[in-house]
Image: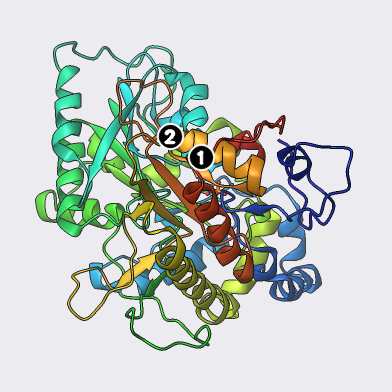
Amino acid sequence: MVLVPLHPSKAGPAAASAAGNSDQAIPTKPLINLLRGWPAPSLLPVDQLKMATADVLADTGVVVDSLQYGPDSGFQPLREQLASYLSRIFAAYGVPNDPERICITGGASQNAACILQSFTDPAYTACVWVSAPCYFLMCPIFEDSGFAGRLRAVPEDDQGTDVKALERGFKEFESSPPSEPVYKNNLAPQRKAYRHIVYVVPASSNPSGKTMTVSRREQLVRLARKYDALLIADDVYDFLQWDVPRADAVLANKQTSVALPRPLPRLVDVDRMIRLEEEPIEDPKSSRRFGNAISNGSFSKIVAPGLRTGWVEATPAFAYGLAQTGSSKSGGAPSQFSAATINVLMRTGELDRYLQEVMRPALQWRHRLLIQAYEKHLSPFLELKCGGLPTTDSELPTTYGGYFLWFKLRRADWSAAAISKRAFAQENLVIAEGPLFEVKGDEAGAQFDDHIRLCFAWEDEAKIEEGVERLARVLRNWDEPEAATDAPQAGAGDFK
Ligand SMILES: Cc1ncc(COP(=O)(O)O)c(C=O)c1O
């Protein structure tokens, strides 16, 4: 991966070649990257992490454990912190304060690979169904686990993943009855192969920004139970939700404190609640004990991606089975030192303070800046699909979250890939073109060359509006003859 410099003050190749003469010294626009889905460097909790790592290293009761190999299920104090934290946040849904439901992971991506290792068999599991548009970097993880050519896009509608389309897909595989797991006869009894995997981002999806309704969540879980599917829910934006102040609210700056709005039940909560209703006594031999939905949590977006730490919440049987994945059996769950550090952030209340006073206010404010810039410069060209500012008479949801906004091109003859190329060549601006979010290998699945995604988390505030102005200039001048350019093509992966 080619990393874009954080402070690209020097002339970039795009500017020189866009001007048609690379010999002249040309004043260059600094690169603006509205593709990258990382937290802005200015938002990283450096001081809090200094305190927390110093605390771990100075604590004679913790330091050795934190630096040694650890338990398969992860650093126990963090499992306990998480169980207690999640049971408080999701108290309305009766979430038990039970560390046995938690397994520490190396973050959502690493853990998706572990889930596939322990809970699928490519000779038994039919497909990985991916809600589309999708977080594109999950596709290679599924492919690496034996599902290349067997990723299937499931469209989204206003409520979230289209369950009718999903059921039609499941039914295609009913006529070819499953054999027993073939390659992996070592899974039982602690693990099992599911017949289907379904990958979704129920809250503030990347890229669409949509949040799945509660009734859709329930339909999805019931369907998963009927067809022996495992729902992998990337719940990575659950704590990055905020109330959206109305469009006419006069705000001069970001708020100093932004509380988490009341969350919806996660798929793992819905699954547990349905099981409690329908199967009050769990048969320890039933494959039902693993459940049909797991919450794939991550500290990447709420503390720092470099920590590479996350967690799973699931049934105790699933959480235990996951910890039996070979790579965790060898030396314990990943990210032991990071887990110990995060445990301090949670125990001292620093994580909550940071989310409340830094991260959510910043994202809420940047989201508003991007929308206002869109309304000023881009609305003739793009239609905002989700996440607008409510007005007195609008029915728009009053909460939003995550890092992204998703737009549809208004002109039918436009291609997002062509726009992205021209934006880079002419304006040194990187945007995410819709095709990036298509499900890999499913050419018959939903196509998105009429969409783009803009991220408001990475670039600092002033650059957000400037990026929007640059994009508007590209679109306004679209029908002008294009200057010849030998600018290097921006590969989206280069700027992730
Ligand atoms: C939906 C989704 N899942 C997972 C990730 C990556 O998570 P992690 O850093 O924990 O692997 C991202 C990052 O952009 C994401 O948007």
* Tags 2 and 1 touching, CB below 8 Å: yes
The C terminus is located in which quarter?
top right
Label 2 sits on residue: 415
Vertical relation: 39 (above or below) 295: below
Residue located at (43% from left, 58% from top)? 378
Vertical relation: 90 (above or below) 111: below
Q: Residue furthest left?
A: 278
- Classify 10 Å Cα crowding around label 2: few (below 14), some (14-19), many (20 and above): some
- Amino acid carrying label 1: it is Ile
Residue 321 marker: none
- As helix, strand or loop, the secondary structure at mark 2 comes to loop
Number of disc labels: 2
Label 1 sits on residue: 419
User: x and y percent of residue 175 in the render?
Assistant: 14, 12
Q: Residue furthest front?
A: 481
Residue located at (70% from left, 52% from top)? 31
Query: Horizontally, is 144 left or right of 195 in the view?
Result: right
Taking depth in this image into account, of 210 and 340 the one nearest to the observer is 210
Query: Horizontally, is 212 left or right of 99 in the view?
Result: left
Res 3 quadrant in image: top right
Residue located at (37% from left, 72% from top)? 89
Q: Is residue 54 visible?
A: yes
